[in-house]
Structures are given as structure tokens and as C-alpha cells.
Amino acid sequence: MADAAALQAILQAGVAAGHAPGMTAALAGPEGVIQAAAGVRGADNASAMTEDTVVWIASLTKAVTSAAAMQLVEQGRVGLDDPVARWLPRLAEPQVLEGFGDDGAPQLRAARAPVTLRHLLTHTSGLAYDFFSADLVRYLQATGASLMGAEDPDIPLLFEPGAGWQYGISTDWVGKLVEAVSGERLDAYVEAHICGPLGMADTTFSPGERQNTRRASVHQRLPDGSLLPIPFAMPPVPYFAMGGGGLYSTAGDYLTFLRALLAGGGPILRPETVAQMGRNQIGPLGAGALKTSNPALSNDYEPMAGAPKGWGLGFLINHDPRPAGRGAASLAWAGLANCYYWLDPAAGRAGVLMSQVLPFADAGVLSTFDAVEALAYA
């Protein structure tokens, strides 16, 4: 692994190419930890992007929420194959969307199998995001339902639980399950049982003054390639989507979480639990390919395109080694504002890159992430 100056040079090149106003990254390996930042916190904020800049990490939250749920599994308070209806009444009688009638009305039927925690952790529940499902967009338009309110959304499954892989609000429901089983609100649980023990002082669902003075702006890429700063803030706690995408953090804080997983989970999880989370749980079902239904939020995305991939209890898993150095059975995922991480247990390496750019799967930011990963194995 090269030094921080080499990492900073990669980020600076990405900023100079217009991939983002600023980026921050952190790498860990057997040699130690390096961090770097480049650019500014926003097109509307000339403050330098620093290693401690706070960003909205969106779906990087999912791994943290998954770890919280697995703590409760370790304690025997919930089982992976327990139907979650015991704690989540909204999922007690799930409906499967089979299509739409000639009048546009959704056609639904009762699901034949219950939704379990394993289904939620592996995105095999049938629950989707509207921005990755045209069918769900059509359903929401027909019914007036929404995924963005404070209430638990009442939406159908797109297939029988366990019959497919569909990225969506499953991990948001995992967050609700953590609350129901533990008796604690999710923000309090994560602070007490994950962020606190790991010393992740800047990882929070509700940034305070100390974090807000270091926040980066979120940007929308315009058709001409320029970046427009946009008003952005997650809703006040509590809100439904906390578990799937509600956290703010820094590259260094998130690397601390990844390093804990590299080290076998201490002090937040047992080694055998971390190993289980990193094993493919979905058999031959493919995972990871996303088809956008809202180009303003996301481009189409298929990480490691064409390579066989699975899904563990919270992570994408590549089955084969990758050219940049990532070994087989590495774990990874990403956040909507173009934040990305990977975790390579066999090599003892992990890395995270953070920006604040929409839509997701920005080609420029992804090229920077590829360069960051290659540096980690240089």
C-alpha cells in the first residue's frame, strides 16, 4: 500500500477532472492506515475538503444496521429465519404485485411464504426502492402511497420471499426490527452498541453543531456535466428510512467500522458472526445489478459487471478475484451520493471513498474509486 500522498494525488486528479468538488478517502491494510482529502466541501463552500469532513453516507448505513441486527441474533433475541411479522405487523400479511389491470389498477395476491430476517438482510424479501423499480413507481402512482413518510410504508413485494434479489427498503425494515426487538430507538441503539464502542464520534443520524460545521454539500450533476449544490438534509429522527440510508459519517469513522470487521468483529460482533455475514446467503441468485427508474437519482449500476456475485448478511460478495487486487469473497457496497467501500478479509485490506454527488454510479467518481482500490494493493 502506498502512502497518503499517493492517495491524495488520486483524489486531487479526480477533483481536477470535475468528478466532484471534493472527495475524501481512507485505506487500511497490514501496513497501517492512510487517509487523504482533496478539493472543497462544495461548489457553494470553499472550505477545504478535510479528512474529518462529514458526509451523508446513504446506503453505507446498511452494513451498520445489519451489524446491529446480527448482535441481536448473537444474543438469541431473534433468529435469521424467524418470520418478522412477530415484531413488524405491517409485514404480517405481505402482498405480491403480479401486474396491473387494463385500468392501471395493481393486481395483488397474498404471499405464500413469510418474510424473515434473512430475507431482509439479503434483499430477497421482494421489497424494492421506487428509483430501482419501474413497477413500484407505477404502483405508488396508482395508490398514492410513499416510501418517504414517517410511517411504515405499505407496499407490495415484487416476488415471493426468497425467490429473487431486489435492492430496496429491506434494510430499513431491519432497522425497525432492531428497534422492536431491542426496545431502543435505532439512533440510540447504534450509538450505544456500535459507534460508541468503536469510538466513531462523527457517525450519527442527527448531526449536531460539531458535525455541521464540517458538512460537505450535496450536488446534482447537470446535463452539461457541471455540479449544482442542492438543498439536502435527512428528515428529523425518527423516520422510516433510517436503517437503510440515514447516517452521516466521515471516511475515517467508516474505516474504523470496516477495520473492526477485518479484525473479526471485536468489540461489536463475534468472529463467527462476521464470517457468517461474509458468506453468500442467496445461492445462485444474482446480486448487485441495478436498473434505474429515476435517472436524476441514479444511473444504471452493475459493480464488477459480468462477474458472478452473491450477497451475504448485509454485503455484496464477489466470487472471483478482481483485477485491481480485491480477493475472492471480498465484501462491498455503496451509497447513493457516490460513496463506496470494499472489505477484503483474506488480504486484511479495506477502503472507503466518499463524495456528495448525484446521480449515483457517477462514472468519474467510480473511476477514482477504482484507482483508490488499485493503490491499496500496489
Image (cartoon, rainbow, N blue to C red):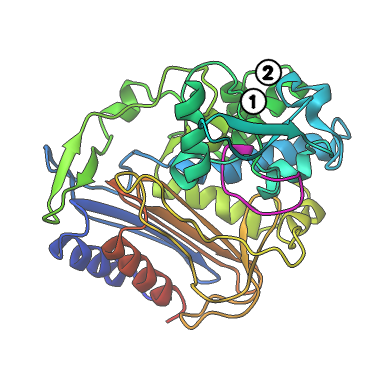
Up/down of 298 relative to 311, above or below = above
Residue 98 quadrant: top right
Give the main secondary structure of the magenta stretch: loop
Which of the 4 image quarters holds residue 89? top right
Q: Mark 1 belongs to which amino acid?
A: Tyr
CB under 8 Å between callouts 1 and 2?
Answer: yes
Instruction: Write the start and end of the magenta stretch as one range.
Output: 159-170
Three-letter amino acid code of the residue under disc 2? Glu
Circle number at residue 184: 2
Q: Secondary structure at mark 1?
A: helix
Q: Is residue 301 above or below residue 195?
A: below
Which image quadrant for residue 10? bottom left
How far across and how far down the image is residue 271, in percent?
Answer: 77, 55
49 left or right, relative to 134: left
Q: Determine which residue is flagged by label 1.
A: 189
270 falls in the magenta region? no
Instruction: For label 2, count other residues whose C-alpha is less than 10 Å away and answer few (under 14), some (14-19) or many (20+).
Output: few
